[in-house]
Amino acid sequence: MDWQACTIAVVGGDRREQEIARQAALTGARVQAYGFPWPDAGIQGVVHADTAAAALSGAHVALFPIPGIAPDGALFAQALTERIIPTRDMLVAMREPRAIILGWADAHLKTAAQDLGITFHEYEWDKDLMLLRGPAIVEGMLRVIIENTDFTIHQAQIGVVGQGTIGFLVTRTLIALGARVSVFARNKVQRAEAYAAGAQSYSLEALEKEAARLDILISSVPHQLVGPAVLGALPAHALLVDLAAPPGGIDREIAKSLGLRFIWARGMGSRAPVTVGRSQWSGIRPRIEAILGMAPESV
């Protein structure tokens, strides 16, 4: 495949997208970028566009950020005060095969793109890419815990809600640090895996009963499973850490009203942007190759 015939737009994001844009440019593709922090020295081979629309103009493939889209449809863009909400008018200037690769697309974005024949390739829940960025997320979570507690992780009573890819990495790491970990999950196989790793294992229904003994409660599930009943049962010193994408796994308004310490630790992969950016590119690149391979005459 001739990468030099391909134009890639990288729109929104943070320093992870810096590295993704850098890796994309190394292929020989034309890369147009907007919306992430721009380094003083620039990025070799990457054109810094003035607007999101300019970055998207003429692009065969658009790369949008890893974090989820805001409720109003705005892309995550750390460097901007403005909101980047991709509209039909923005996307119409893309060129065939017109594809967007991103963590996940909401209904607003899909509607804007539908009439243009733009395809979406979502990777938020791809297990291989989650595992690759998982260590950075876990390291970021540990920093949040250390900075917001006056007790050690060692021997702390920590509850983990959810045992998907990230939840299991969290559990394994906390156990290795000497925490007394209790896992709460619907899936009985995941509960068994947590038990085998050294955690106490419970169904979600047991969380309210067990909450009173927890020093820290961590959620990695993007559904609000931790509500008023559980939050009201936690001790006053408890720290809540929500690792989930929007809308989050913990009712933060209730948590704050109860005076509990709450940290929405989304985007923890940004702690190691070079590592995570490269790992994400390792998954994005074959997707671009597949997209362009399906329509080689278009580029």
Image (tube, rainbow, N blue to C red):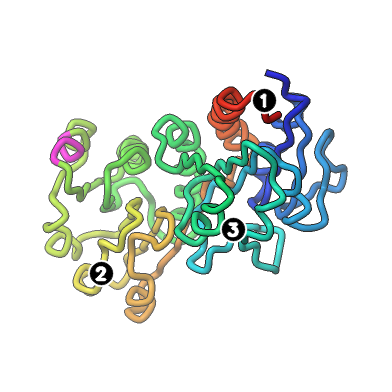
Horizontal and vertical percent position of residue 73:
53, 63
Helix or strand or loop: what does disc 1 sit on? helix
Q: What kind of residue is marked 1? A: Glu
Horizontal and vertical percent position of residue 164:
30, 41
Badge number at residue 75: 3
Res. 209 image quadrant: bottom left
Q: What kind of residue is marked 3? A: Leu
User: Is 150 placed left or right of 9 in the picture?
Assistant: left
Q: Which residue is mark 1?
A: 297
Q: Is residue 189 magenta?
A: yes
Helix or strand or loop: what does disc 2 sit on? loop
Label 2 and label 1: CA atoms lie apart by: 53 Å
Select label 1 or label 3 by which is in front: 1
Label 3 and label 2: CA atoms lie apart by: 27 Å
Whichever of callouts 3 and 2 sits on the residue coming sooner in the sequence is 3
Q: Which residue is mark 2?
A: 227
Q: Residues within 10 Å of mark 2 (few under 14, many from 20)?
A: some
User: Is 15 placed left or right of 103 in the picture?
Assistant: right
Q: Which residues are magenta?
A: 188-192
Label 1 and label 3: CA atoms lie apart by: 31 Å
Q: Is residue 31 magenta?
A: no
Q: What kind of residue is marked 2? A: Gly
